[in-house]
Image: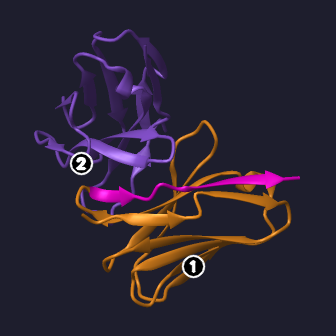
Amino acid sequence: NAGVTQTPKFQVLKTGQSMTLQCAQDMNHNSMYWYRQDPGMGLRLIYYSASEGTTDKGEVPNGYNVSRLNKREFSLRLESAAPSQTSVYFCASSVGSLAKNIQYFGAGTRLSVL
Amino acid sequence: GQQVMQIPQYQHVQEGEDFTTYCNSSTTLSNIQWYKQRPGGHPVFLIQLVKSGEVKKQKRLTFQFGEAKKNSSLHITATQTTDVGTYFCAGPGDYKLSFGAGTTVTVRA
Protein backbone atom coordinates (compact mmCIF):
# COMPACT_ATOMS: atom_id res chain seq x y z
CA ASN A 1 0.00 0.00 0.00
CA ALA A 2 2.08 2.92 -1.29
CA GLY A 3 -0.30 5.79 -0.41
CA VAL A 4 1.20 9.01 -1.77
CA THR A 5 4.46 8.71 -3.70
CA GLN A 6 6.67 11.67 -4.52
CA THR A 7 9.68 11.82 -6.80
CA PRO A 8 12.44 12.82 -6.56
CA LYS A 9 13.29 12.74 -2.85
CA PHE A 10 16.16 15.20 -3.21
CA GLN A 11 17.08 17.72 -5.89
CA VAL A 12 19.65 20.45 -6.31
CA LEU A 13 19.05 23.07 -8.98
CA LYS A 14 20.88 26.11 -10.21
CA THR A 15 19.04 29.41 -10.38
CA GLY A 16 16.99 29.58 -13.56
CA GLN A 17 16.73 25.84 -14.11
CA SER A 18 13.35 24.19 -14.41
CA MET A 19 12.05 20.95 -12.98
CA THR A 20 8.88 19.03 -12.31
CA LEU A 21 8.02 17.35 -9.03
CA GLN A 22 5.89 14.27 -9.46
CA CYS A 23 3.18 13.00 -7.14
CA ALA A 24 0.92 9.97 -7.43
CA GLN A 25 -1.64 8.47 -5.06
CA ASP A 26 -3.21 5.03 -5.13
CA MET A 27 -6.07 5.66 -2.69
CA ASN A 28 -8.60 6.76 -5.32
CA HIS A 29 -8.74 10.20 -3.72
CA ASN A 30 -10.42 13.05 -5.53
CA SER A 31 -8.36 15.92 -4.12
CA MET A 32 -4.66 16.56 -4.21
CA TYR A 33 -2.43 19.31 -2.82
CA TRP A 34 1.06 20.74 -3.03
CA TYR A 35 2.59 22.37 0.07
CA ARG A 36 5.93 23.88 0.85
CA GLN A 37 7.44 23.74 4.33
CA ASP A 38 9.95 26.29 5.56
CA PRO A 39 11.36 26.60 9.09
CA GLY A 40 8.93 28.37 11.41
CA MET A 41 6.32 28.74 8.67
CA GLY A 42 4.41 25.51 8.93
CA LEU A 43 2.85 24.12 5.79
CA ARG A 44 1.76 26.60 3.14
CA LEU A 45 -0.49 25.57 0.30
CA ILE A 46 0.88 26.25 -3.17
CA TYR A 47 -1.85 24.78 -5.39
CA TYR A 48 -4.58 22.25 -5.01
CA SER A 49 -6.84 20.19 -7.22
CA ALA A 50 -10.27 19.57 -5.77
CA SER A 51 -11.05 16.99 -8.44
CA GLU A 52 -9.69 15.67 -11.69
CA GLY A 53 -9.64 18.44 -14.28
CA THR A 54 -9.55 21.35 -11.83
CA THR A 55 -6.72 23.24 -10.19
CA ASP A 56 -6.72 26.31 -7.96
CA LYS A 57 -4.16 28.62 -6.43
CA GLY A 58 -3.33 28.37 -2.78
CA GLU A 59 -1.57 30.78 -0.47
CA VAL A 60 1.81 30.92 -2.27
CA PRO A 61 1.35 30.08 -5.98
CA ASN A 62 3.83 32.52 -7.55
CA GLY A 63 6.64 30.82 -9.46
CA TYR A 64 4.82 27.49 -9.73
CA ASN A 65 2.50 25.71 -12.11
CA VAL A 66 0.60 22.47 -11.66
CA SER A 67 -0.99 19.79 -13.79
CA ARG A 68 -3.60 17.29 -12.68
CA LEU A 69 -2.66 14.67 -15.22
CA ASN A 70 -5.36 12.21 -14.15
CA LYS A 71 -7.05 11.20 -10.94
CA ARG A 72 -3.86 9.63 -9.59
CA GLU A 73 -1.22 12.17 -10.57
CA PHE A 74 -0.61 15.83 -9.69
CA SER A 75 2.65 17.45 -10.72
CA LEU A 76 4.30 20.70 -9.65
CA ARG A 77 6.54 22.59 -12.03
CA LEU A 78 9.13 25.25 -11.32
CA GLU A 79 9.75 27.04 -14.60
CA SER A 80 12.73 29.15 -13.50
CA ALA A 81 13.93 28.16 -10.06
CA ALA A 82 14.98 30.83 -7.57
CA PRO A 83 16.87 30.50 -4.27
CA SER A 84 13.65 31.54 -2.46
CA GLN A 85 12.14 28.25 -3.66
CA THR A 86 14.58 26.24 -1.58
CA SER A 87 12.24 24.28 0.62
CA VAL A 88 10.72 20.92 1.40
CA TYR A 89 7.76 20.17 -0.85
CA PHE A 90 4.96 17.84 0.21
CA CYS A 91 2.20 16.42 -1.88
CA ALA A 92 -0.98 15.33 -0.13
CA SER A 93 -4.31 13.81 -1.07
CA SER A 94 -7.74 13.51 0.51
CA VAL A 95 -11.07 11.90 -0.29
CA GLY A 96 -12.60 15.30 -1.00
CA SER A 97 -11.62 18.92 -0.79
CA LEU A 98 -13.61 19.82 2.30
CA ALA A 99 -11.48 20.98 5.20
CA LYS A 100 -12.84 18.16 7.34
CA ASN A 101 -11.23 15.56 5.09
CA ILE A 102 -8.05 13.97 6.41
CA GLN A 103 -4.98 14.61 4.31
CA TYR A 104 -2.37 11.95 3.57
CA PHE A 105 1.12 13.17 2.81
CA GLY A 106 3.96 11.89 0.68
CA ALA A 107 7.52 11.61 1.99
CA GLY A 108 8.50 14.99 0.55
CA THR A 109 11.02 16.41 -1.90
CA ARG A 110 13.92 18.35 -0.46
CA LEU A 111 14.87 21.00 -3.00
CA SER A 112 17.88 23.30 -2.91
CA VAL A 113 18.26 26.11 -5.42
CA LEU A 114 21.77 27.54 -5.62
CA GLY B 1 -7.89 35.33 6.44
CA GLN B 2 -8.38 32.41 8.73
CA GLN B 3 -5.27 31.45 10.61
CA VAL B 4 -4.54 29.06 13.39
CA MET B 5 -1.79 30.10 15.78
CA GLN B 6 0.19 27.59 17.79
CA ILE B 7 2.15 28.12 20.97
CA PRO B 8 4.79 27.46 21.98
CA GLN B 9 6.91 27.18 18.84
CA TYR B 10 9.45 25.02 20.68
CA GLN B 11 9.04 22.77 23.70
CA HIS B 12 12.02 21.17 25.44
CA VAL B 13 10.80 18.50 27.80
CA GLN B 14 12.49 16.26 30.33
CA GLU B 15 11.65 12.63 29.69
CA GLY B 16 8.79 11.62 31.95
CA GLU B 17 7.34 15.12 32.29
CA ASP B 18 4.04 16.36 30.91
CA PHE B 19 3.51 19.24 28.50
CA THR B 20 0.75 20.97 26.59
CA THR B 21 0.70 22.70 23.22
CA TYR B 22 -2.05 25.10 22.23
CA CYS B 23 -3.79 26.07 19.04
CA ASN B 24 -5.86 29.26 18.77
CA SER B 25 -8.11 30.71 16.11
CA SER B 26 -9.71 34.15 15.81
CA THR B 27 -12.86 32.60 14.37
CA THR B 28 -15.01 29.60 15.18
CA LEU B 29 -13.78 26.38 13.63
CA SER B 30 -16.08 23.67 12.35
CA ASN B 31 -13.41 21.12 13.15
CA ILE B 32 -9.73 20.87 13.98
CA GLN B 33 -7.16 18.27 13.06
CA TRP B 34 -3.82 17.39 14.60
CA TYR B 35 -0.84 16.00 12.73
CA LYS B 36 2.59 14.81 13.85
CA GLN B 37 5.79 15.06 11.83
CA ARG B 38 8.83 13.12 13.00
CA PRO B 39 12.25 14.66 12.25
CA GLY B 40 12.99 14.19 8.56
CA GLY B 41 9.53 12.75 7.99
CA HIS B 42 6.17 13.84 6.70
CA PRO B 43 3.02 14.97 8.54
CA VAL B 44 0.83 12.12 9.70
CA PHE B 45 -2.76 12.56 10.81
CA LEU B 46 -3.40 11.98 14.51
CA ILE B 47 -6.97 12.98 15.24
CA GLN B 48 -9.91 15.20 14.35
CA LEU B 49 -12.17 17.04 16.80
CA VAL B 50 -15.59 18.26 15.76
CA LYS B 51 -17.80 18.87 18.79
CA SER B 52 -17.63 21.76 21.24
CA GLY B 53 -15.75 20.68 24.36
CA GLU B 54 -14.77 17.36 22.82
CA VAL B 55 -11.96 15.42 24.47
CA LYS B 56 -10.25 12.46 22.83
CA LYS B 57 -7.40 10.34 24.10
CA GLN B 58 -4.77 8.29 22.32
CA LYS B 59 -2.69 6.49 24.96
CA ARG B 60 -0.65 9.31 26.58
CA LEU B 61 -2.00 12.02 24.26
CA THR B 62 -5.13 13.98 25.19
CA PHE B 63 -6.74 16.28 22.64
CA GLN B 64 -9.32 18.89 23.55
CA PHE B 65 -11.54 21.21 21.53
CA GLY B 66 -12.61 24.38 23.31
CA GLU B 67 -16.21 25.12 24.21
CA ALA B 68 -16.27 28.06 21.80
CA LYS B 69 -14.53 25.97 19.11
CA LYS B 70 -11.82 28.62 18.77
CA ASN B 71 -9.00 26.77 20.46
CA SER B 72 -7.61 23.32 20.94
CA SER B 73 -4.89 21.71 22.99
CA LEU B 74 -2.72 18.62 22.94
CA HIS B 75 -1.49 17.35 26.29
CA ILE B 76 1.17 14.63 26.48
CA THR B 77 1.76 12.86 29.76
CA ALA B 78 4.98 11.12 30.76
CA THR B 79 6.84 12.27 27.66
CA GLN B 80 8.95 9.64 25.92
CA THR B 81 11.69 9.93 23.30
CA THR B 82 9.19 8.62 20.76
CA ASP B 83 7.21 11.85 21.21
CA VAL B 84 9.96 13.87 19.52
CA GLY B 85 8.74 15.77 16.46
CA THR B 86 6.58 18.67 15.35
CA TYR B 87 2.88 18.73 16.16
CA PHE B 88 0.63 20.73 13.86
CA CYS B 89 -2.95 21.75 14.32
CA ALA B 90 -5.01 22.51 11.22
CA GLY B 91 -8.40 24.07 10.72
CA PRO B 92 -10.59 25.22 7.84
CA GLY B 93 -9.11 28.34 6.28
CA ASP B 94 -9.07 30.50 3.18
CA TYR B 95 -7.22 27.77 1.33
CA LYS B 96 -8.84 24.55 2.41
CA LEU B 97 -6.91 23.35 5.47
CA SER B 98 -4.87 26.01 7.26
CA PHE B 99 -1.94 24.64 9.24
CA GLY B 100 -0.43 26.26 12.27
CA ALA B 101 3.33 26.79 12.37
CA GLY B 102 3.72 23.79 14.66
CA THR B 103 5.23 23.03 18.04
CA THR B 104 8.59 21.30 17.79
CA VAL B 105 9.21 18.99 20.72
CA THR B 106 12.61 17.78 21.89
CA VAL B 107 13.10 15.40 24.80
CA ARG B 108 15.96 15.30 27.29
CA ALA B 109 16.68 11.77 28.42
Helix, strand or loop at mark 1: strand
Foreground: A54 or B4? B4
Q: Is residue A44 magenta?
A: no
The mark found on residue B12 in the picture is none
Q: Residue at x 31, y 46 (%)?
A: A45
Q: Is residue B104 magenta?
A: yes
Circle 1 residue: B56
Q: Residue at x 29, y 47 (%)?
A: A29
Q: Identity of the amino acid at label 1?
A: Lys
Foreground: B63 or A42? A42
Image: magenta residue range: B96-109
Q: Residue furthest right?
A: B109
Q: Is residue A102 above or below residue B41?
A: below
Q: Identity of the amino acid at label 2?
A: Asn
Magenta region, main secondary structure: strand
Circle 2 residue: A30
**Can marks 1 and 2 be said to lie on one chain?**
no
Please tell me in which quadrant of the rendered image residue B96 appears.
bottom left
